[in-house]
Image (cartoon, rainbow, N blue to C red):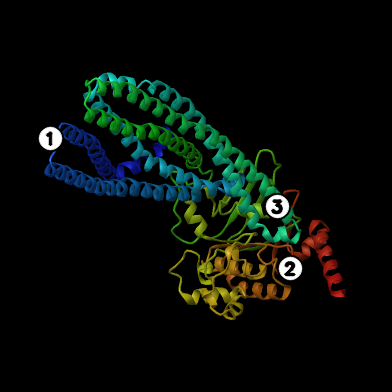
Amino acid sequence: MRHFAVLKEYFAKYRYRILLGILALVIVNGLQLLLPRIVKYVVDGIINSRMTDVSLLRWAFIILIIAIFMALFRFFWRYFVLGTSHRIREHLRNRFFAHLQSLSMTYFNNTKTGELMALATNDILAVRRAVGIGIVIIVDTVFLTIGALIMMFRINSVLTFLALIPLPILSLTTFFMGRALHVRFRNVQDAFAKLTDKVQENLSGIRVVKAFVQESFEVNDFRTHNQHFLKENMRLVKIWGAFFPLLMMLGGISTAIVLLWGGRQVIINFLTLGDFVAFTMYLSILTWPMMGIGWVVNIFQQGAASMARINTVLNATPEIANLPNAVSITKSLKGDISFSNVFFKYSEEYPYVLKSLNLHISAKEQVAIVGRTGEGKSTLVSLIPRIFEPERGVVHIDCINIRDYRLEDLRKRIGFVPQDTFLFSLSLRENIAFGNIDIPMECIIKAAKIAQIYDEIMELQDGFETVVGERGISLSGGQRQRIAIARAIILNPDILILDDALSSVDTETEEKIVKNLMPMIKERTTIIITHRISSIKQIRRIIVIGDNTLKEDGNHDELISLGGIYKNLYEKQMLEDKLKRSL
């Protein structure tokens, strides 16, 4: 039960609803235990010729009233207990999602999306069943078992002991099979997570699959994952499939003992027929608790396995978080940025992406960063809004270690257009404003015009209210990038970072965007990462990253005269452009 400790606050919040549901369930069980007693009186009355038509009618009416009340209170316990389980599921799912938002990028780099999707759906459903119908079955089993046994002992204690002979076998079976069920259900959930991840990965990369004609390979790979999922389910079914038949067999043994010994007691007039009928009815009532033990073991083992998986996420601590005495940013940042002896790598088994990097960018300075692919340019700018943390070294903004700033305040002051543009399945207006619902429409329009996307938006039937597909799939790469630029500049940030944000637009559009951005760029610290050197020649300062550290620093002419990495990159691009024009 330790896995469910995280739900304690929700049980406390809904304790009265749960208690009302349990009370309603106990009333239903009490009425159910009353019925065999009534049948005993009726049967004995008929046998002894003491039952009249009026008496039969009265007892039938009483049974009808009991049935009505049982139906009414069954509704109440379902409403309160099962309804509460749905509320707890909502709280748990919200908590799970909120905690995911707090985790650092390193966690997501090491965790598959499909596994998280399985946790948010299938595993949380298993937990809901455990805290809903699982609680019902426990109460039902305990109350009916105790109540039925008391009534059976009152009728005949010897017959009751004989009927309970299979009970020790039942207890041992439940204990050993329960442990096996827990392990096998966890394996099923793990296999389901891998299957979900496979589907998610395939759908995200469906364009690549079709472009490389890999549909058959993907189908076969999916079949492999699906076969593994089936295999784990069948291993679970072997245990679960044997559990219920064994319970029913033990119940059948009890029934045979009662018929043999109890029937003999009726024949020799030691037990009335009414008592015998009532006893068999109570034994039938006991059959459900015996089955309920199997159900509750299965449900709680599933719930415990799923809750354990969920707890691995809830117990994960964010690597990047606010310090206890974090400084709030109450006014605009100047934008003075410095990197001091910074080292960074994504994991222990990989080499350093940045090493011994020292760099200073003055407030409101415009800087372009170039370099070969894989030298750490994107990683460098990701350290500024603390998307990642340096392994060693310090990053300062306005002479303050960025770790000392409140994370939320810091990121709100930075307009960041990452290399991988992502749009949500929302309207274009909502994608540009993105969470800032109070931004006036004229600001959205202005940002779209600066990003050179306004005219194309207005050509759409619904304009800014056009809903783009998942990940913005209905837009071209260049359109997505320009929407992302508009999203960044609408915040009027103190620091603007464009990480290869114009790679998918043509040269003419790129020049227009840069020209529109110039008035805004001059008012704030701006960092532009690009592979097109021609577009940043006018930037006064260009930084060249090579061998995962700062190699060259200066303006265009100075770097050309150095004859180093920058000149080599520039000459290659000029040659490529010349070849394109000649074709």
The amino acid beneath tag 2 is Lys
Cα distance in 3D space between marks 2 and 1:
111 Å
Using residue 160 as the reference point, say whether residue 503 is left or right of it. Answer: right
- Identify the mark nearer the N-term, 3 or 1: 1
- Residue assigned mark 3: 218
Of tags 3 and 1, which is closer to the observer? Answer: 1
Mark linked to residue 50: 1
Instruction: Out of 122 and 487, give the one closest to the viewer.
Output: 122
Using residue 222 as the reference point, say whether residue 402 is left or right of it. Answer: left
The amino acid beneath tag 1 is Arg
- Residue assigned mark 2: 537
Of tags 2 and 1, which is closer to the observer? Answer: 1
Using residue 110 as the reference point, say whether residue 241 is left or right of it. Answer: left
Q: Is residue 531 above or below residue 92?
A: below
Rendering coords of residue 212 (x, y %): 76, 58
- Identify the mark nearer the N-term, 2 or 3: 3
Which element carries disc 3, helix, strand or loop?
helix
Instruction: Out of 485 and 277, give the one closest to the viewer.
Output: 277
Which element carries disc 2, helix, strand or loop?
loop
